[in-house]
Image (cartoon, helix red, strand yellow):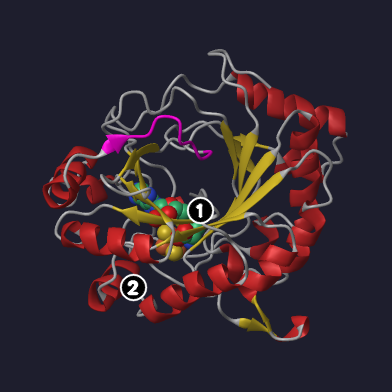
């Protein structure tokens, strides 16, 4: 699948739930905390059918997200189905990490991380904005820092290697600008890839107030004041839009995801998103979304579903609208970050 701007679409980000066990300030605004009715949420069979259709059109990489994907019942069986889909070669998960170390009784007490690994998940992205417990609780609405750190340990113990665990930190002025160095040290000690992400107006525009927004450029300056000049690492690539740098005198890579201030952010986008209630979205920062659940539930053939994919790809915008006074129409938790 190729869009009008020559982007080859091979990556599908699939949200399997809008529910979450945390309440991050930037993702789930206080006034919008109702879950969707279950009947609206795609069943695992429906999700698998849509992914299969995507794979028949060239999707090779999948990232499962939410909400918090590990809160959905039966998630491991879902992965078992997904890894059988022909063409899907790379499966990742985005999680807040709080459930990764939990033993799964029906799997003989293996941890969730071990089960994910054994079900073919190759990469784990864990959100971690701070190592300060009080700030973590204030930002996520839950006092789960110890569980999240245990979750990252569990992922390492489960066999996820140095380039297979990424830690994502959303930058927020007044909350975590003093945490950049501690997070880098933590990532170094644990051989993790750390990425700093600019706040995006995905759930509410308030979140981007001058008081909150911490641009990548300032984060870089703060890091360089401590470590010296960062060395661009243009050949180091993961699947997303991060630009990587190397810390001087070290092999450690740090990524920056600057959706708001990096004007080249969209140039290599290869992604579509599927929301948990069956909307295909060509771009996180655009209102465009197309219902695939309705035709699916009405008995559409694979060919008809392929047409929906192709229509969505044909409408993929050149770039996101975040810089254009964008007014979000959904919570991030309901899009799938
Ligand atoms: N619950 C999982 C987690 O927290 O990683 C997966 C879903 S979450 C929506 C995916 C990613 O989106 C997280 O890394 C989160 O930090 C990021 N995110 C959520 N709201 C954001 C915002 N307003 N700006 C930037 N990133 C955001
Ligand atoms: Fe939940 Fe992840 Fe959103 Fe936080 S960022 S509220 S953990 S979905």
State the residue at coordinates (20%, 46%): 219
Q: Dividing the picture into quarters, in which one does residue 263 lie?
A: top left
Residue denoted by label 2: 141
- Residue 189 lies, with reference to residue 275, above or below; the image says below
What residue do we see at 43% from left, 26% from top? Answer: 266
Quarter location, residue 121 = bottom right
| Label pair 2/1, CB-CB below 8 angstroms | no
Mark 1 surroundings within 10 Å by alpha-carbon count, few (fewer than 14), some (14 through 19), many (20 or more): many
Front tag of 2 and 1: 2
Residue 312, disc: none
Within 8 Å: ligand 1 and the Cβ of disc 1?
no
Q: Residue at x 73, y 43 (%)?
A: 89
Task: Say which label, 2 or 1, has the lower sequence index.
Answer: 2
Secondary structure of the residue carrying tag 2 is loop
Give the image location of residue 239, x and y in percent.
53, 38
Residue interval drawn in magenta: 231-239
Tag 1 residue: 334
Residue located 30% across and 29% down the image: 262
Q: Is residue 238 inside the magenta stretch?
A: yes
Q: Main secondary structure of the magenta part?
A: loop
- In the rendered view, does 97 fall on the left or right side of 26? right
Foreground pick, 171 / 238: 238
Residue 117 drawn above or below residue 227: below
x and y percent of residue 118 in the render?
Answer: 74, 66
Give the alpha-carbon distance from disc 2 to disc 1, as whole Å: 17 Å
Viewport quadrant of the N terminus: top right
Q: Position of residue 328 (x, y in %)?
A: 37, 41
């Amino acid at each position: 699948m190729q869009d009008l701007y020559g982007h080859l679409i091979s990556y599908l980000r699939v949200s399997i739930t809008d529910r979450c066990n945390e309440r991050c300030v930037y993702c789930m605004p206080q006034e919008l905390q109702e879950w969707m009715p279950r009947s609206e949420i795609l069943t695992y069979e429906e999700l698998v059918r849509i992914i299969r259709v995507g794979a028949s059109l060239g999707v090779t990489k999948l990232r499962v997200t939410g909400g918090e994907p590990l809160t959905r019942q039966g998630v491991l069986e879902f992965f078992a189905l997904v890894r059988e889909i022909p063409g899907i070669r790379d499966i990742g998960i985005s999680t807040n990490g709080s459930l990764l170390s939990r033993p799964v009784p029906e799997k003989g007490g293996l941890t969730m991380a071990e089960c994910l690994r054994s079900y073919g998940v190759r990469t784990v992205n864990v959100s971690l904005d701070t190592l300060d417990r009080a700030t973590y609780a204030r930002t996520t609405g839950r006092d789960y820092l110890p569980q999240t750190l245990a979750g990252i340990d569990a992922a390492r113990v489960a066999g996820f290697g140095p380039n297979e665990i990424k830690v994502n930190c959303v930058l927020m002025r007044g909350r975590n600008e003093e945490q950049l160095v501690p997070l880098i040290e933590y990532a170094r000690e644990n051989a993790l890839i750390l990425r700093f992400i600019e706040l995006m107006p995905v759930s509410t525009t308030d979140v981007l107030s001058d008081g909150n927004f911490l641009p990548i450029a300032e984060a870089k300056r703060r890091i360089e004041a401590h470590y010296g000049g960062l060395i661009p690492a243009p050949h180091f690539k993961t699947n997303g839009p991060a630009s990587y740098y190397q810390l001087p005198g070290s092999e450690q890579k740090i990524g920056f995801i600057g959706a708001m201030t990096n004007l080249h952010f969209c140039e290599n986008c290869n992604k579509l998103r599927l929301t948990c209630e069956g909307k295909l979205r060509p771009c996180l920062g655009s209102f465009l979304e197309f219902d695939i659940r309705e035709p699916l539930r009405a008995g559409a053939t694979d060919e008809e579903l392929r047409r929906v994919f192709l229509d969505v790809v044909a409408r993929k915008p050149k770039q996101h609208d975040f810089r254009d006074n964008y007014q979000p129409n959904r919570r991030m938790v309901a899009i799938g970050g």
